[in-house]
Amino acid sequence: MNAPVRQGANGTSLWHAINRDHRERPTLQGRLDVDLAIVGGGFSGLSTALHAAEKGISVAVLEAEIIAWGATGRNAGFVVPNFAKMDPDSILAHLGSERGQRLVDFAAGSADLVFGLIRRHGIDCDAVQNGWIQPAHSPAALEKVKSRAGQWARRGRPVVTLDRREVEALTGVRGYVGGWMDRSGGVLNPVAYARGLADAAEKAGARIFERTRVTSVDRIADGWALKTPSGSVRAARVLIATNAYGGSLIPLLQRTYFPLKVFQIATAPLPLEIRPRLLPGGQGVGDTRRNLFTFRFDADNRLISGGMHILGAGADMRVPQTIWRRLASHLDLPDLPQLAYSWSGMAAVEPDFLPHLLDLGPGLIAGRACNGRGIAMTTAMGKVLADWAAGAEARDLPLPFAPPAPIPFHTLLRHAPNMLHGWSILRDRMDHAA
């Protein structure tokens, strides 16, 4: 099967293409003094701005492009309140019981925080909080997800394990051996959600500037000075909230994570008659394969899925076609509508797949909380960073906090996640053959 590919305008996503009512925000002109300056207008920066402004803190958000231009506007819109690789028991073993439990609690309530903000601020973003499903692709994977679900259930989370028939009934997909669901998860339109956070932050008193690229961050006697091409900001505290889109602003940060290029696609809308079979409850799905298979519907009944790629020429055309064919095969849809949109984005992957706060100096922090769980984790990170902006010690927050630790041999290893993709596909096939 082949499908025509349509890139989003200027490389942006489906979400930017269908959310055409973007309200332009000003570019910073002249000097501005604030308590907190935030570099980056994605989920983490906007959530921090909202929660800090609600505490009476003066806030300026400086975005180099437009709100939700980076990974915030390029993801698939899954709201997942758990960790990509580690489970609660392993986190407690890794961080210790006290700090580990605080991080587990932080993640556990992250989806509820997202949907609570949406309700409280009346954000129109097609939000559906009916759960997130992780089907198991092999018996070994099923044992792992049963353990995972049990660990979250013991902590009072609304989770349930699923047998083969229950997974098929909920997803419409055959072949999985079972799975689990966290009922607090869900899906939404990420660009509409980000714009809603921005509107709420401005109503609370924050100032947001677009097309305002920060060119330097320098220490001064009473805080930090940030320069842009047309202005400057002086702030007592600064948050770098750019994830993998920070460029050369603070070069050290680029060597502390693995940049992972992820592709997403959206089909043309499917007939409504298909919905009684496929995801009738509107959940999001991300399975246990190393070559992760995800799918969901948007509000217009488009199917959305994503994937990685092995490094090589022509990925922008080749990978979306591969994802489209995989979607048709896994969902048993020989007449899958054509691929209507394709886009890609960069994720910042931590070596331990956990969220982190990086100590860059007195009153200067970088926050990273994605690792495939961006919407829930970055929103929650913004709430605790507002406490830091109000005077709390960063070491007392629930996220790991330490100076940047460059990854050894980063220049050689930076593309490892994409380079190992082929091996991941092979191992998934071996799981099925076992």
Image (cartoon, rainbow, N blue to C red):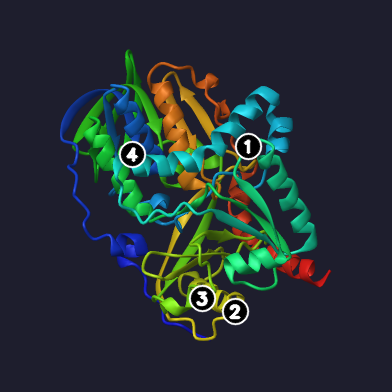
Q: Position of residue 4 (x, y in %)?
A: 41, 82
Question: How much space separates mark 3 and mark 2, taking CA atoms?
Answer: 9 Å
Vertical position of residue 121 compared to residue 218: above or below: below
Residue located beneath label 4 in the image: 120
Q: Is residue 248 visible?
A: no
Q: Residue furthest top?
A: 221
Residue located beneath label 3 in the image: 324
Question: How much space separates mark 2 and mark 1, taking CA atoms?
Answer: 37 Å
Q: Amino acid at mark 3?
A: Trp
Foreground tag (4 vs 2): 4
Label 3 environment density (alpha carbons within 10 Å; few <14, some 14–19, many ≥20): many
**Number of marks in picture:** 4
What residue appears at the point 30 percent right and 40 percent down from the top-left corner?
A: 121
Query: At numbered mark 4, what does the secondary structure look like: helix, strand or loop?
Result: helix
For the residues labelled 2 and 1, say whether their Cβ atoms are less than 8 Å apart.
no
Residue located beneath label 1 in the image: 156
Vertical position of residue 378 compared to residue 133: above or below: above
In the rendered structure, the answer to whether residue 229 lies left or right of residue 322 reads left
Q: Earlier in the sequence, mark 4 or mark 2?
A: 4
In this view, the residue in front, 5 or 392, is 392
In the rendered structure, the answer to whether residue 290 lies left or right of residue 201 reads right
